[in-house]
Image (spheres, rainbow, N blue to C red):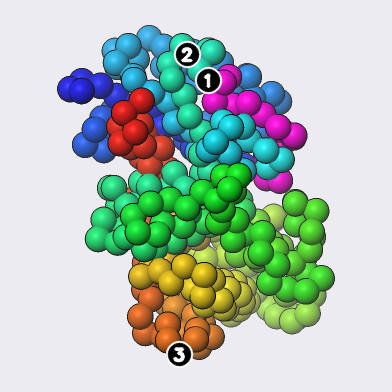
């Protein structure tokens, strides 16, 4: 299989990253485009095809693997993804296969990130861990005994939609209080308004027009008390939730992936603090909180591409 490549694609609510990968995990070509630019999924598929069809590596691509929210590994469909503008059931694997004439498969985006972390990142030494993706929403890829847990219908590990606050914030899934409405880049933004109205504080963050999650972390590093309060609030909800989730799979580690995780070690330390404070005694001081070793747009495409080689498509 020398000179054989895989096309890995990570479709997020905000951006789509894709890359051509070799068997050693080297990224030969990589690009990121806004998912929101495309009204229909077919338009995205066509845009990717036009971008790479003339590359030297194109004819050596042996398979395409896509990670996407609510991606069903068994059917190849995206099914009712709350963080995508495309609604309903989308036969995405078939769309890619028909356009590229290359075998294509689909998985949950967090599952793809977990596979990438296990093969190329900060989980090479782990057989039992959970990848927590902190992006527009919150995803989770659960690895037990070195294998992804898919469940009966391919939707195992939807930690972002476990309700952590009774009658809490309205989620894109239609329910209230889901974890991702608090612990995600979108959730951090929502906390600005919610906590500002409850705690009147003088803050340089509030002088920023439409502040992002990145703005919150940047201002916290400068000592902004209000920004630090938002981060602590987010870390407490995430750490407490991970303590509860440990009862399910008994992982050796949680690996935090995405923009929030890449903001620095302080956030992970606060998550760890609240995790230990709320964990069962049998799990205390046994489960690590790690930060992804891969660039926040690379892990998912590496994981997706790697699965092409391991499954010998």
Q: Nearer the viewer, residue 49 or 205?
A: 49
- Spatial CA distance of label 1 from label 3 is 48 Å
Which residue is identified by label 1? 96
Q: Where is residue 125 in the image (x, y as percent from the top left)?
A: 25, 60
Marks 1 and 2: in contact by CB < 8 Å? yes
Decide if residue 280 is on the left or right side of residue 23.
Answer: right
Residue 8 in sight here = yes
Marks 3 and 1: in contact by CB < 8 Å? no
Q: Position of residue 77 (x, y in %)?
A: 61, 32
Instruction: For the C terminus, give its image quadrant.
Output: top left
Classify mark 1: residues with Cα within 10 Å, few (<14), some (14-19) or many (20+). Answer: many
Decide if residue 203 is on the left or right side of residue 296.
Answer: right
Identify the residue at image location x=25%, y=21%.
4
Total number of numbered discs in the rendering: 3
For marks 1 and 3, the one nearer the N-term is 1
**59 above or below 38?**
above
Circle 2 or circle 3, nearest the eye: 3
Identify the residue at image location x=28%, y=47%.
120
Decide if residue 46 is on the left or right side of residue 307.
Answer: right
Image quarter of residue 54: top left
- Spatial CA distance of label 2 from label 1 is 6 Å
The magenta stretch is 82-95
Query: Residue 100: which numbered mark, if any?
Result: 2
Query: Residue 281: which numbered mark, if any?
Result: 3
**25 above or below 45?**
below
């Amino acid at each position: 299989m020398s000179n054989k490549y895989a096309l890995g694609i990570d479709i997020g609510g905000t951006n789509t990253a894709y890359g051509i990968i070799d068997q050693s995990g080297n990224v030969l070509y990589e690009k990121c485009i806004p998912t929101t630019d495309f009204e229909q999924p077919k338009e995205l598929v066509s845009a990717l095809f036009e971008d790479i069809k003339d590359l030297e590596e194109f004819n050596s691509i042996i398979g395409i693997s896509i990670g996407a929210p609510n991606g069903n590994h068994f059917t190849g469909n995206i099914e009712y993804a709350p963080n995508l503008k495309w609604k309903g059931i989308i036969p995405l694997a078939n769309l890619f296969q028909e356009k590229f004439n290359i075998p294509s498969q689909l998985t949950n985006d967090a599952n793809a990130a977990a596979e990438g972390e296990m093969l190329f990142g900060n989980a090479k030494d782990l057989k039992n861990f959970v990848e927590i993706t902190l992006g527009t929403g919150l995803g989770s890829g659960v690895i037990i005994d070195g294998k992804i847990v898919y469940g009966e219908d391919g939707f195992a590990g939807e930690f972002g939609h476990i309700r952590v606050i009774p009658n809490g914030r309205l989620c894109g899934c239609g329910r209230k209080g889901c974890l991702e409405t608090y612990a995600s880049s979108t959730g951090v933004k929502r906390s600005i308004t919610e906590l500002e109205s409850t705690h009147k504080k003088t803050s340089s963050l509030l002088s920023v027009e439409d502040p992002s999650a990145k703005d919150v972390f940047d201002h916290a590093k400068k000592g902004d008390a209000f920004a630090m309060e938002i981060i602590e609030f987010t870390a407490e909800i995430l750490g407490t939730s991970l303590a509860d989730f440990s009862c399910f799979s008994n992982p050796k580690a949680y690996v935090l992936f995405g923009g929030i995780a890449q903001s620095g070690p302080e956030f992970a330390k606060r998550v760890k603090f609240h995790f230990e404070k709320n964990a069962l005694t049998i799990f205390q001081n046994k489960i690590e909180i790690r930060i992804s070793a891969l660039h926040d747009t690379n892990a998912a495409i590496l994981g997706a591409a790697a699965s092409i080689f391991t499954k010998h498509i």
